[in-house]
Amino acid sequence: MIALKDVSYSYEGCAALKKINLHIGKGESVALMGVNGSGKSTLLKLLNGIIFPDGGEYRFDGETITQKKMQDAAFSKRFHQRIGFVFQNSDTQLFCSDVYDEIAFGPRQMGMKETDVESRVQDCLALLNIEDFRHRQPYHLSGGEKKKVAIACVLALNPEVLIFDEPLNGLDPRTQRWFVSFLIKLHEAGKTLISSTHDLEMVQEIADRAILFGEDHTIAADKPAQELLEDIDLLKKVNLIDEYYHRHPGSTHQHFHIHPF
Ligand SMILES: Nc1ncnc2c1ncn2[C@@H]1O[C@H](COP(=O)(O)OP(=O)(O)O)[C@@H](O)[C@H]1O
Ligand SMILES: [Mg+2]
Protein backbone atom coordinates (compact mmCIF):
# COMPACT_ATOMS: atom_id res chain seq x y z
CA MET A 1 0.00 0.00 0.00
CA ILE A 2 2.86 2.35 0.92
CA ALA A 3 6.18 2.04 -0.88
CA LEU A 4 9.21 4.28 -0.55
CA LYS A 5 12.16 3.75 -2.83
CA ASP A 6 15.46 5.51 -2.04
CA VAL A 7 13.58 8.48 -0.61
CA SER A 8 15.66 11.42 0.57
CA TYR A 9 14.60 14.77 1.96
CA SER A 10 16.55 17.82 3.13
CA TYR A 11 15.55 21.10 4.73
CA GLU A 12 17.66 23.78 3.08
CA GLY A 13 20.60 21.48 2.59
CA CYS A 14 20.19 19.77 5.97
CA ALA A 15 19.41 16.09 5.47
CA ALA A 16 16.39 14.73 7.37
CA LEU A 17 15.85 11.47 5.44
CA LYS A 18 18.53 9.53 3.58
CA LYS A 19 17.74 6.82 1.04
CA ILE A 20 14.74 5.38 2.84
CA ASN A 21 13.36 2.11 1.49
CA LEU A 22 10.13 0.95 3.02
CA HIS A 23 6.98 -1.05 2.32
CA ILE A 24 3.93 -0.96 4.54
CA GLY A 25 1.05 -3.29 3.76
CA LYS A 26 -2.66 -2.95 4.36
CA GLY A 27 -3.68 -3.66 7.96
CA GLU A 28 -0.21 -3.40 9.48
CA SER A 29 0.44 -1.46 12.66
CA VAL A 30 3.88 0.06 12.44
CA ALA A 31 5.75 2.05 15.08
CA LEU A 32 8.31 4.57 13.98
CA MET A 33 11.05 4.95 16.55
CA GLY A 34 14.17 7.02 16.84
CA VAL A 35 15.59 9.90 18.85
CA ASN A 36 14.55 13.50 18.43
CA GLY A 37 15.63 14.88 15.09
CA SER A 38 16.12 11.47 13.45
CA GLY A 39 13.45 12.15 10.80
CA LYS A 40 10.20 10.59 12.07
CA SER A 41 7.98 13.64 11.59
CA THR A 42 9.56 14.35 8.23
CA LEU A 43 8.73 10.83 7.05
CA LEU A 44 5.15 11.11 8.30
CA LYS A 45 4.66 14.46 6.54
CA LEU A 46 6.00 12.93 3.38
CA LEU A 47 3.62 9.95 3.64
CA ASN A 48 0.77 12.39 4.04
CA GLY A 49 1.68 14.40 0.95
CA ILE A 50 2.61 17.58 2.83
CA ILE A 51 6.21 17.47 1.60
CA PHE A 52 7.73 15.55 -1.33
CA PRO A 53 10.95 13.58 -1.81
CA ASP A 54 14.04 15.42 -3.13
CA GLY A 55 15.21 12.08 -4.44
CA GLY A 56 13.60 8.67 -4.84
CA GLU A 57 9.93 7.89 -5.06
CA TYR A 58 6.85 7.58 -2.84
CA ARG A 59 4.04 5.37 -4.11
CA PHE A 60 0.66 5.07 -2.47
CA ASP A 61 -1.39 2.14 -3.71
CA GLY A 62 0.74 1.99 -6.84
CA GLU A 63 0.51 5.68 -7.64
CA THR A 64 3.53 7.99 -7.39
CA ILE A 65 2.75 10.92 -5.12
CA THR A 66 4.12 14.19 -6.45
CA GLN A 67 3.56 17.85 -5.70
CA LYS A 68 1.97 18.29 -9.10
CA LYS A 69 -0.62 15.57 -8.45
CA MET A 70 -1.40 16.90 -4.99
CA GLN A 71 -2.11 20.32 -6.51
CA ASP A 72 -4.96 18.67 -8.39
CA ALA A 73 -7.95 19.20 -6.06
CA ALA A 74 -9.74 15.99 -7.04
CA PHE A 75 -6.62 13.87 -6.61
CA SER A 76 -5.71 15.49 -3.31
CA LYS A 77 -9.24 14.97 -1.94
CA ARG A 78 -9.21 11.31 -2.88
CA PHE A 79 -5.77 10.86 -1.35
CA HIS A 80 -6.70 12.59 1.93
CA GLN A 81 -9.83 10.50 2.18
CA ARG A 82 -7.69 7.36 2.19
CA ILE A 83 -4.86 8.49 4.45
CA GLY A 84 -5.42 10.60 7.56
CA PHE A 85 -2.82 12.44 9.61
CA VAL A 86 -3.08 13.37 13.28
CA PHE A 87 -0.49 16.08 13.92
CA GLN A 88 1.75 16.08 16.96
CA ASN A 89 0.38 19.46 17.97
CA SER A 90 -3.43 19.56 17.76
CA ASP A 91 -3.37 23.36 17.56
CA THR A 92 -1.96 23.16 14.04
CA GLN A 93 -4.86 20.92 13.06
CA LEU A 94 -7.86 22.67 14.64
CA PHE A 95 -9.14 25.95 13.24
CA CYS A 96 -12.94 26.09 13.62
CA SER A 97 -14.74 27.85 16.45
CA ASP A 98 -16.97 24.87 17.19
CA VAL A 99 -16.15 21.17 17.66
CA TYR A 100 -19.09 20.05 15.53
CA ASP A 101 -18.02 22.18 12.56
CA GLU A 102 -14.44 21.07 13.02
CA ILE A 103 -15.38 17.39 12.65
CA ALA A 104 -17.89 18.17 9.88
CA PHE A 105 -15.29 20.09 7.87
CA GLY A 106 -13.73 17.11 6.09
CA PRO A 107 -16.99 15.34 5.18
CA ARG A 108 -18.41 18.66 3.90
CA GLN A 109 -15.27 19.17 1.81
CA MET A 110 -15.89 15.75 0.31
CA GLY A 111 -19.30 16.96 -0.79
CA MET A 112 -21.28 14.73 1.57
CA LYS A 113 -24.98 15.56 2.07
CA GLU A 114 -25.64 17.50 5.29
CA THR A 115 -27.82 14.71 6.76
CA ASP A 116 -24.98 12.23 6.18
CA VAL A 117 -22.48 14.70 7.61
CA GLU A 118 -24.60 14.91 10.73
CA SER A 119 -24.67 11.17 11.32
CA ARG A 120 -20.97 10.86 10.55
CA VAL A 121 -20.11 13.58 13.08
CA GLN A 122 -22.40 11.97 15.63
CA ASP A 123 -20.69 8.59 15.15
CA CYS A 124 -17.26 10.15 15.63
CA LEU A 125 -18.31 12.07 18.73
CA ALA A 126 -19.67 8.83 20.20
CA LEU A 127 -16.62 6.78 19.22
CA LEU A 128 -14.32 9.17 21.06
CA ASN A 129 -16.78 9.75 23.87
CA ILE A 130 -16.75 13.52 23.38
CA GLU A 131 -20.46 14.14 22.76
CA ASP A 132 -20.50 16.57 25.67
CA PHE A 133 -18.36 19.11 23.95
CA ARG A 134 -19.85 19.06 20.49
CA HIS A 135 -20.46 22.82 20.71
CA ARG A 136 -17.38 23.83 22.67
CA GLN A 137 -14.61 25.89 21.11
CA PRO A 138 -11.69 23.59 20.25
CA TYR A 139 -9.33 26.39 21.25
CA HIS A 140 -10.56 26.23 24.84
CA LEU A 141 -10.26 22.47 25.31
CA SER A 142 -7.47 20.73 27.23
CA GLY A 143 -4.60 19.06 25.36
CA GLY A 144 -6.15 15.59 25.65
CA GLU A 145 -9.58 16.84 24.57
CA LYS A 146 -8.08 18.64 21.59
CA LYS A 147 -6.28 15.44 20.61
CA LYS A 148 -9.58 13.54 20.69
CA VAL A 149 -11.24 16.18 18.50
CA ALA A 150 -8.29 16.02 16.07
CA ILE A 151 -8.67 12.23 15.90
CA ALA A 152 -12.43 12.56 15.36
CA CYS A 153 -11.74 14.95 12.46
CA VAL A 154 -9.49 12.40 10.80
CA LEU A 155 -11.83 9.46 11.48
CA ALA A 156 -14.74 11.43 10.02
CA LEU A 157 -13.38 10.62 6.57
CA ASN A 158 -13.03 6.94 7.47
CA PRO A 159 -9.51 6.64 6.01
CA GLU A 160 -7.82 3.27 5.44
CA VAL A 161 -4.49 4.50 6.77
CA LEU A 162 -4.08 6.53 9.97
CA ILE A 163 -0.87 8.33 10.81
CA PHE A 164 -0.13 9.58 14.32
CA ASP A 165 2.87 11.76 15.16
CA GLU A 166 3.87 11.28 18.82
CA PRO A 167 0.27 10.68 19.87
CA LEU A 168 0.99 10.26 23.60
CA ASN A 169 2.88 13.53 23.94
CA GLY A 170 1.28 15.91 26.37
CA LEU A 171 -1.47 13.49 27.41
CA ASP A 172 -2.09 12.59 31.04
CA PRO A 173 -1.54 8.92 31.99
CA ARG A 174 -5.25 8.03 31.91
CA THR A 175 -5.73 9.56 28.46
CA GLN A 176 -2.57 7.76 27.32
CA ARG A 177 -4.09 4.43 28.45
CA TRP A 178 -7.33 5.27 26.69
CA PHE A 179 -5.42 6.17 23.56
CA VAL A 180 -3.41 2.96 23.45
CA SER A 181 -6.58 0.85 23.73
CA PHE A 182 -8.24 3.01 21.09
CA LEU A 183 -5.35 2.32 18.69
CA ILE A 184 -5.64 -1.39 19.39
CA LYS A 185 -9.34 -1.22 18.48
CA LEU A 186 -8.60 0.64 15.24
CA HIS A 187 -6.01 -1.98 14.35
CA GLU A 188 -8.46 -4.80 15.08
CA ALA A 189 -10.95 -3.03 12.83
CA GLY A 190 -8.46 -3.48 9.99
CA LYS A 191 -6.99 0.01 9.77
CA THR A 192 -3.39 0.49 8.75
CA LEU A 193 -1.65 2.43 11.53
CA ILE A 194 1.65 4.27 11.44
CA SER A 195 2.65 5.97 14.69
CA SER A 196 5.84 7.68 15.71
CA THR A 197 6.70 7.40 19.38
CA HIS A 198 9.41 7.45 22.01
CA ASP A 199 7.29 5.28 24.24
CA LEU A 200 8.66 1.75 24.17
CA GLU A 201 5.70 0.37 26.10
CA MET A 202 3.33 1.76 23.52
CA VAL A 203 5.34 0.08 20.78
CA GLN A 204 5.00 -3.20 22.61
CA GLU A 205 1.24 -2.83 22.91
CA ILE A 206 0.19 -1.48 19.56
CA ALA A 207 2.76 -2.38 16.93
CA ASP A 208 3.41 -5.58 14.97
CA ARG A 209 6.44 -4.04 13.43
CA ALA A 210 8.92 -1.39 14.42
CA ILE A 211 11.01 0.79 12.17
CA LEU A 212 13.95 2.37 13.91
CA PHE A 213 15.65 5.50 12.67
CA GLY A 214 19.31 6.03 13.43
CA GLU A 215 20.73 9.43 14.31
CA ASP A 216 22.12 9.47 10.76
CA HIS A 217 18.56 9.71 9.25
CA THR A 218 18.65 6.21 7.76
CA ILE A 219 16.69 3.15 8.85
CA ALA A 220 18.74 1.27 11.46
CA ALA A 221 16.28 -1.61 11.79
CA ASP A 222 12.94 -2.77 10.48
CA LYS A 223 11.62 -5.87 12.20
CA PRO A 224 8.90 -7.35 14.40
CA ALA A 225 8.31 -4.93 17.28
CA GLN A 226 9.01 -7.46 20.00
CA GLU A 227 12.31 -8.45 18.42
CA LEU A 228 13.43 -4.87 18.19
CA LEU A 229 12.45 -4.10 21.78
CA GLU A 230 14.61 -7.01 22.90
CA ASP A 231 17.63 -5.79 20.95
CA ILE A 232 19.07 -3.74 23.80
CA ASP A 233 22.42 -3.17 22.14
CA LEU A 234 20.76 -1.67 19.09
CA LEU A 235 18.45 0.55 21.17
CA LYS A 236 21.49 1.79 23.06
CA LYS A 237 23.40 2.37 19.86
CA VAL A 238 20.69 4.63 18.44
CA ASN A 239 20.46 6.40 21.78
CA LEU A 240 16.87 5.36 22.55
CA ILE A 241 17.78 3.83 25.88
CA ASP A 242 20.78 4.48 28.05
CA GLU A 243 22.68 2.51 30.65
CA TYR A 244 19.95 3.07 33.24
CA TYR A 245 17.99 0.44 31.38
CA HIS A 246 17.50 -2.62 33.44
CA ARG A 247 15.39 -5.68 33.30
CA HIS A 248 14.12 -7.57 36.30
CA PRO A 249 14.95 -11.21 35.75
CA GLY A 250 11.97 -13.48 36.19
CA SER A 251 9.50 -10.64 35.78
CA THR A 252 7.15 -10.38 32.84
CA HIS A 253 7.45 -6.60 33.02
CA GLN A 254 10.26 -4.79 31.37
CA HIS A 255 11.26 -1.44 32.74
CA PHE A 256 12.54 0.94 30.17
CA HIS A 257 14.29 4.13 31.01
CA ILE A 258 14.03 6.30 28.02
CA HIS A 259 16.71 8.80 27.25
CA PRO A 260 15.39 12.20 28.29
CA PHE A 261 14.85 14.75 25.57
N1 LIG B 1 10.88 22.89 9.22
C1 LIG B 1 12.16 22.53 9.35
N2 LIG B 1 13.16 23.33 8.90
C2 LIG B 1 14.46 22.97 9.00
N3 LIG B 1 14.87 21.80 9.54
C3 LIG B 1 13.93 20.97 10.01
C4 LIG B 1 12.54 21.29 9.94
N4 LIG B 1 11.84 20.26 10.49
C5 LIG B 1 12.75 19.35 10.86
N5 LIG B 1 14.01 19.78 10.59
C6 LIG B 1 15.26 19.01 10.83
O1 LIG B 1 15.16 17.77 10.17
C7 LIG B 1 15.65 16.71 10.99
C8 LIG B 1 14.55 15.68 11.23
O2 LIG B 1 13.53 16.27 11.99
P1 LIG B 1 12.15 15.55 12.35
O3 LIG B 1 11.65 14.85 11.17
O4 LIG B 1 11.28 16.59 12.97
O5 LIG B 1 12.65 14.49 13.45
P2 LIG B 1 11.84 13.70 14.57
O6 LIG B 1 10.39 13.81 14.27
O7 LIG B 1 12.38 12.31 14.51
O8 LIG B 1 12.20 14.37 15.87
C9 LIG B 1 16.18 17.38 12.26
O9 LIG B 1 17.56 17.58 12.09
C10 LIG B 1 15.44 18.68 12.30
O10 LIG B 1 16.20 19.67 12.94
MG1 LIG C 1 8.88 14.55 15.41
Image (spheres, rainbow, N blue to C red):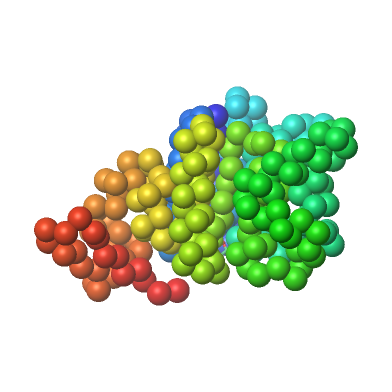
Where residue 181 sits in the image (x, y, percent)?
46, 50
| Above or below, comparing residue 164 to residue 83 in the picture | below
Direction from residue 220 to residue 98 in the image, left or right: right
Identify the residue shown where x is 85% and y is 40%. 108
| Quadrant location of the N terminus in the rendered image | top right
| Above or below, comparing residue 174 to residue 78 in the picture | below
Identify the residue shown where x is 81% and y is 38%. 117
Callout count: 0
Where residue 160 sits in the image (x, y, percent)?
60, 33
Where residue 77 sits in the image (x, y, percent)?
78, 36
Direction from residue 52 to residue 97 in the image, left or right: right
Where residue 197 sits in the image (x, y, percent)?
46, 57
Identify the residue shown where x is 16% and y is 64%. 248
Q: Nearer the viewer, residue 61 or 141?
A: 141
Ligand 1, what quadrant? Answer: bottom right
| Quadrant location of the C terminus in the rendered image | bottom left
Direction from residue 16 to residue 100 in the image, left or right: right
Q: Is residue 222 visible?
A: no
